[in-house]
Image: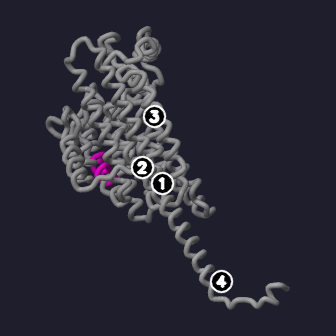
Amino acid sequence: MLWLCAFSGFFVTSEPAPYDILLVCAMVGWGIFGLELKQGFSPLVLLILLFMAGGLLSITQLTTYDRGPMYMAVSFFLASGAVFYAGVVAQSPDHLRPIVRGYTAAAVIAALAGIIGYFGLLPGAETFTLYGRARGTFEDPNVFGPFLVFPLATLTYTVLTARMATRAAAAMILLVLLIGVLLSFSRATWALAAFVMAATGLIVFINERSALKRLRLTGLAMTGIFVLALALAAALSLDSVSSLFTERASLLQDYDSSRMGRFARHAAGFLLAAKHPLGIGPLEFYKIFTEDPHNVYLKAFIAYGWLGGISFIVLTFWTLAALFPLIFKPRPWTPIAIATFVTLFGHDIMGLVIDMDHWRHLFLLYGLAWGLIALEAHRGEMLDDAKFIHMARTSLRRTRERARKPAVSERSAAW
């Protein structure tokens, strides 16, 4: 069921998506048969409750209740999914494998759909594109691209650390996902993918203590960069790719820096949020500025009020701060902790220019992060208990040894 839930995340063209139905089934089934809420991820539960409380208060500011309540219901459902994933991961680290493998399989199918759509390899393949950009099985290329990034991190780790046969298979899958990222023609996704792969390689290099293995990692990284440069050159040799790449590669587009462009809307939006402590309600920003906020932090204050905005920012920083120490500890789940941390960190930066509060994979990542944090906390508790038991046994053994010694004579005691 966990594999199916993660796998179904590749197909989101409308709501409810297949992912939503499967996740409901998993949450109900797991809740009946023993899902536990552990203390290790209690901050996640508290901050999500505060986030949704801000959203409910924001609904009271609506003048018409057409789409706002349903939007907030979807937000609550996706946020509760993060708690579910945190619970199942905290229950057992064995639950990480089906989630990651299902997610990776979903990313491969989405990337292949985007490639087929962009190059028109099958009849009707244009349904997998939007405005000349690959969108795969998603509504928007700007969601399709970031969805592929978490598997990029896990596969990069595998390429750098696994055996030769496993490394070759991972490299082939990695290349397919990178082509999908390229054809999304999302500048933020390009930067996110480059950051995630570079950060993963750097953390692996830092964690490796052997000078010889560090030299091997450096050689692998240089080889990988060379291969990727060749693949990019081959892709840009196609006129259909190079023309759109040249257009999209500029740092600022007209809709970013124009008089009422993206950054001007950000400034106006924060001034508007400062005047409305309860927010203005979900989907109301579009009615005022004819565009979405394109900033997840601004949207948190606008659609969820000050309470929701502050809760979301606290959740962002608390998650990164609590997860950061785990990426340098030798644990069985360290590779997934590294991939989760760098992907979340990249998403948090990308949130400055895009809305992400309804991205299903984002809440899955928050669930993985807090599940890993809870696993580490539980491991620490077990070690503390083991130390206490060892000390108690040692003290008891010494007491028994003293009791077996013969009593000293009065003269010896006086002496």
Q: Which mark is residue 348?
A: 3
| Tag 2 secondary structure | helix
**Left or right side of 381 for 112:** left
Q: Amino acid at mark 1?
A: Ala
Sequence-wise, the earlier of marks 2 and 3 is 2
Question: Could you say where residue 195 lies in the image, as x and y percent from the top left?
Answer: 49, 40
- Magenta stretch bounds: 100-108
Q: How is the image coloured?
A: one colour
**Left or right side of 315 for 111:** left
Sequence-wise, the earlier of marks 3 and 4 is 3
The residue nearer to you, when weighing 342 against 373, is 373
Closer to viewer: mark 2 or mark 3? 2
Closer to viewer: mark 4 or mark 2? 4
Residue count near mark 4 (Cα–Cα under 10 Å), binned few <14, some 14–19, many ≥20: few
| Tag 1 secondary structure | helix
Sequence-wise, the earlier of marks 3 and 1 is 3
Q: Amino acid at mark 4?
A: Arg
